[in-house]
Image (cartoon, grey):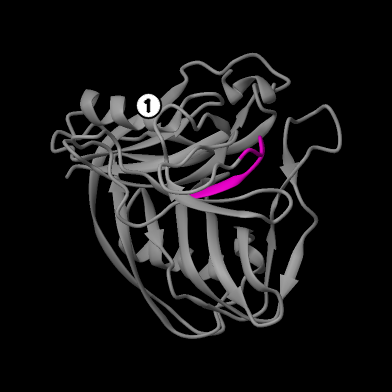
Amino acid sequence: MSRSHLIRHPGPPTQPRRHVVRGVAEPLSFELGAGEVLMTAIAQVMDAADCDSAVVRLDGLVLGPYEFVMPDKSPDDDHAAWYSETHSGPSARLDRGTAIIGRRNGEWFLHCHAIWEDPQRGRCAGHLLPHQVTIGAAYSGAGYRFDGGCFDVTADAETNFSFFRPRQLTQRQDVNAAIVSLAPHEDLSTAVAELSAELALGNPQVVGIGSLIGADFTDAPSMESPISEVLLLNDARGAGPDGPYLPTFCVDPDGNFFEGTLKAHTAPICVTFEMLLVAG
């Protein structure tokens, strides 16, 4: 039986199930200064880049004092999943991290899932709170700028959450990429494969974060939790002779970690999945 039956959201199903905006992605390099608040520093990067949205890697970023949350069960019937209490630490270094950058009420905002090493806690993973994260050391990073549309925080009746959803801003003729959000119960690998073909992106790079209702891997034990937070790892691709290649890291509400290559048709979305596909 599909794992999708394990999660039922409070509202009517969102339509369409895949929100997609085509546009132009180009490499983006950036610098972050020590002592700055992560959200403030990223907003300055975005203002200087003069682009509509961006998706960046934060691998190796050193944190000073920081706060984060993990996935958790909902305390009420208003949501099917929720967040843990806020955790904090004095310092850490990100092993891998992905930030989706868009707008919330017209202001720059970011959504970041990461894996890191904390001297006191050891290995951690979850959702960094961008206004409560201080950059611990100067950092040079990279990712993609995107023009033609933006990730915009949008209220979603199905899940009763507000989260990033692509919004088209301009029509571009020279498209080479798309920003995407997937609704609950969409299978991640199926959606990536179909979008790669429909958008004529070849074997695109795929960068993204979200949540899954369990997952099976071709090379590691399954994650059975119906609630999780997830990031796709470097080198994820949308097509190929064996279908999408989606190396993935997951954390469940108990703090268990799972890492492996997603097996096709085994990873339905829990709340949302946000990603950028860049033609390959």
**Amino acid bearing label 1:** Thr
* 190 left or right, relative to 112: left
Q: Is residue 228 magenta?
A: yes
Label 1 packing within 10 angstroms: few (<14), some (14-19), many (20+): some
Between 233 and 68, the one lying in front of the other is 233
Q: Magenta residues, as a range? A: 224-231
Q: Residue at x 60, y 61 (%)?
A: 125
Which secondary structure class fits the magenta region best? loop
Asked if residue 110 shows in the view, the reply is no
Q: Quadrant of the N terminus?
A: top right
Q: Residue at x 50, y 37 (%)?
A: 216
Q: Residue at x 47, y 75 (%)?
A: 61
User: Picture coordinates of residue 112 (x, y %)?
Assistant: 53, 56
Asked if residue 44 shows in the view, the reply is yes
Please tell me in which quadrant of the rendered image residue 238 appears: top left
* 237 left or right, relative to 84: left
Q: Which residue is mark 1?
A: 190
User: Under tag 1, what secondary structure?
Assistant: helix
Between 232 and 275, the one lying in front of the other is 232
Please tell me in which quadrant of the rendered image residue 60 appears: bottom left
Q: Quadrant of the C terminus?
A: top left
